[in-house]
Image (cartoon, coloured by chain):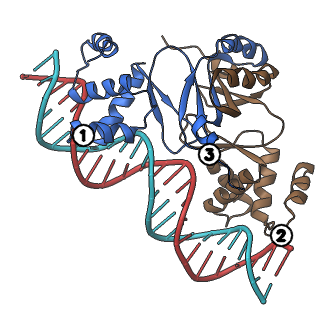
Chain colours: A brown, B blue, C cyan, D red
Amino acid sequence: MNVVVEESISLLRRPGIRMTQQRLAIMEYLTTSNSHPTAEEIYRELNKKLPNISNTTVYNNLNFLKEQGLIQELIFGQSCSRYEWRTRPHYHVICTECGKIDDFELPELNRLEEAAQRESNFQISGHLFELYGICTECGQEPLQS
Amino acid sequence: MNVVVEESISLLRRPGIRMTQQRLAIMEYLTTSNSHPTAEEIYRELNKKLPNISNTTVYNNLNFLKEQGLIQELIFGQSCSRYEWRTRPHYHVICTECGKIDDFELPELNRLEEAAQRESNFQISGHLFELYGICTECGQEPLQS
DNA sequence: TTAATTGCAAATGCTTTGCTATCGG
DNA sequence: CCGATAGCAAAGCATTTGCAATTAA
């Protein structure tokens, strides 16, 4: 078990919350894989070690971890959500060809919420910024004309 | 019929494309309403004038208009998509309380794709930027403690 | 012990698909 | 006339819900 999961377990050690092997497995998977998996992908992967795990349990735990603020749900224009363990703020580039996702940081955006606050009548509380493009692998392939 | 729709109609006047009253009604609704409606909302509204219109027709036409580049599908963390007529580039603020959407422009973001291009390995082709916050109406209501 | 959580099956809700009838050009 | 589009019903798919059985604390 890795140190991130260990820390989170102690955070979750409070009345009304229990640690199950399913929940633990999901937390470990999300902290070790850096692939922004879908619920389905998590389910298929964990199924290898926990043949009885159900799809519902994966969804339940993803919602639970999201409520606890430990993970982030990523909603792109795809049919299903992706999930990632929450670390420090960063953004995503999504390949429009193969769907691959890369992380990157862009400190310039920190001041943008203030600018937006001036432009809008809303009380701004957060933002979403995503980039779209072609990843290196897809870019190498010759385009058909 | 308004001038935006008129212009679009002449753009669409080419072999293989036909103008139906349903398509026309959807185009008119999207150019006159500024409420970022869902497919369901469009359907319910048009149903008043065209009692026979079907949900499928709304979806078909929204996909058609999207392919033609005339409208934009907005995918937020909600269960269904919203749609808007494409005008000049702008961004959205979404109220986390009531779901209301406002438009705003932020020219500072134009240069951000270039910055992102330097940070990432992708060939950047576009971006998405959204703000979240509380709108004026929702902000006025006293929070329950 | 006991209440949180699992896992199954069924339900839900948005969107798409298959197919025939209709209608636009 | 002919093929694009409408409209209906059914299917698809991700996600949620209801509920009895299990299990962590």
Quadrant of the frame with the C terminus of chain B: bottom right
Q: Which residue is mark 2?
A: A15
Quarter of the view holding residue B134? top right
Q: Earlier in the sequence, mark 3 or mark 1?
A: 1
Quarter of the view holding residue C6? bottom right
Q: Which residue is mark 1?
A: B48
Q: Amino acid at mark 3?
A: Glu
Q: How far is the residue under mark 2 from the one under mark 3?
A: 33 Å
Q: Position of residue A68 (x, y in %)?
A: 77, 53
Is residue B95 visible in the rendered structure shown here? yes
Q: Position of residue A124 (x, y in %)?
A: 69, 32
Left or right of B108 in this view: B12: left
Q: Are marks 2 and 1 on the same chain?
A: no
Point 69% across, 21% down: residue:
A118
Q: Which residue is mark 3?
A: B141
Label 3: chain? B
